[in-house]
Amino acid sequence: MSDFKDRLFSGVGTLALTATAAATGSITLHGEASAQWLWDRDRNVSVTQRPRAEYDALGVRSGAFIWRPRADLGIEHNDNIFATATAEQSDTIFVINPSLSVDTTWSTHAFSAFANVLHREYSDFSDESTTDYSFGTSGRIDIVRGSSISASASHSRGTEPRTSAGAAGSTTEPIRFDTTNFAIGGDHVFNRLRLRGGYDVSKADYDDAPLIGGGIASQGFRDRTQHRFTARADYAVSPDTALFARYRHNERDYRLSPPAIPAARDSDGYTFDVGVEFDLGGLARGEIGLGYMKQKYDDPGFTDSEGFSIEGLVEWFPTQLTTVTLSAQRNIEDSGIAAAAGYIGTSFAAQLDHELRRNIILTGRIDYGNDDYQGIDREDERWGATIAATYLMNRNVGIRAGYNYVDQRSSGAAGNRDFSVNRFTVGLVLQY
């Protein structure tokens, strides 16, 4: 269930509205022990989350810690590595992805950390080869039953895909960037009422890259720090279902301002939504939130973005061997294009995971995305499809193979290139 929760609340730090009172011991708990059953959401287990005693890696135990080393080795063939409309170039890419994580086995409180490196080596176009990395840590302090405070921090060095909307398709080498994140939060349960809230900050720093034909694609206008504050209240109407209301406020501060750049890109906004969280034993579980969002830009030359918001993830279990996952999201994102401060991004996905045998898992997925830019005449529409198979030989070795197709169509006077990409992958998973 923890993996499911991570997907629902990814990137959202939670700091309880009552955390200060809890830390000073001023909260009076009444009926907490008997209330926990109202918030259990682990009666269903998806195909990808299901424990497999004979195939799950054991890790290396050291006192109260479990270390989990892993290495993913793969080969990928991409028939359009630059995501162009014509004169497509193909290449074979060798992928090396070692990683290490550590978790505690404490009965209360928790601590975890991770580190990984991803190297992609192109056979023919060596300038496309990149080495990315990330590392981070997180922890949780259980104050009293039903009340906890958590915090996390991470840093990563990444590469922008050639399929992205900005200048990545017209540079001689990939655009690199660094991101640093910190979050602090907590929650508290008052019988049928659960309160959560928090603060998280994210800083992004983009590198410039040389343009094809000469010149520099300056990316300094994208460097920013985002602050976000979250407050949420859930009310359990039954052991299966809870209703919630959530408010999220953000402030996006950019490093550069006029005259260094043509227009100020700073903004602040909010999303308010209401929804339902449920876990219907043997049938489905999930969370769906619908609401309203708005982003106001400091520069009057940028049009404010607003509209209805969607955030949902539902898992349906037609049989014990099959899981169907449906997801939807609609929010306001910052743009990688200097002429447009932001866009409204809408995405939907449907994924089917089937356990053919205990050690053979088949996956099929369909994706749809739409980016409607504000302030310029441009709209990007994407479709994607994926099929994959995982074969677990034993608890230390696995084999994966897959195919992915992406097609984008861009319209409007400021529209971007159209392209399609086919990717075939095969890989080996080594874990201990």
Image: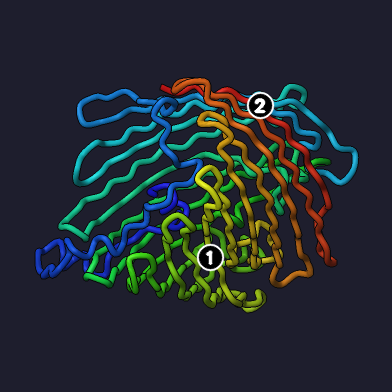
Q: Which residue is depicted at the point 41% across and 25% down? A: 54
Which residue lies under the disc numbered 2?
A: 426
Q: Which residue is depicted at the point 53% across and 55% down? A: 316
Q: Earlier in the sequence, mark 2 or mark 1?
A: 1
Rendering coords of residue 260 (x, y %): 61, 60
* Along the viewing direction, whichever of 255 and 242 lies nearer the viewer: 242
Q: Which residue is depicted at the point 40% across and 44% down? A: 154
Rendering coords of residue 189 (x, y %): 24, 66
Residue 112 placement, left or right of 329? left
Q: Which of the labelled discs sits on residue 311, or is there none?
A: 1
Amino acid at the residue labelled 2:
Val
* Along the viewing direction, whichever of 107 and 269 lies nearer the viewer: 107
Q: Residues within 10 Å of mark 2 (few under 14, many from 20)?
A: some
Q: Residue furthest right?
A: 87
| Residue at mark 2 to residue at mark 1: CA–CA distance | 32 Å
Q: Secondary structure at mark 2?
A: strand
Rendering coords of residue 198 (x, y %): 34, 63
Residue 399 placement, left or right of 195? right
The picture quadrant where one finds residue 310 is: bottom right
Q: Secondary structure at mark 1?
A: strand
Amino acid at the residue labelled 1:
Glu
Total numbered circles: 2
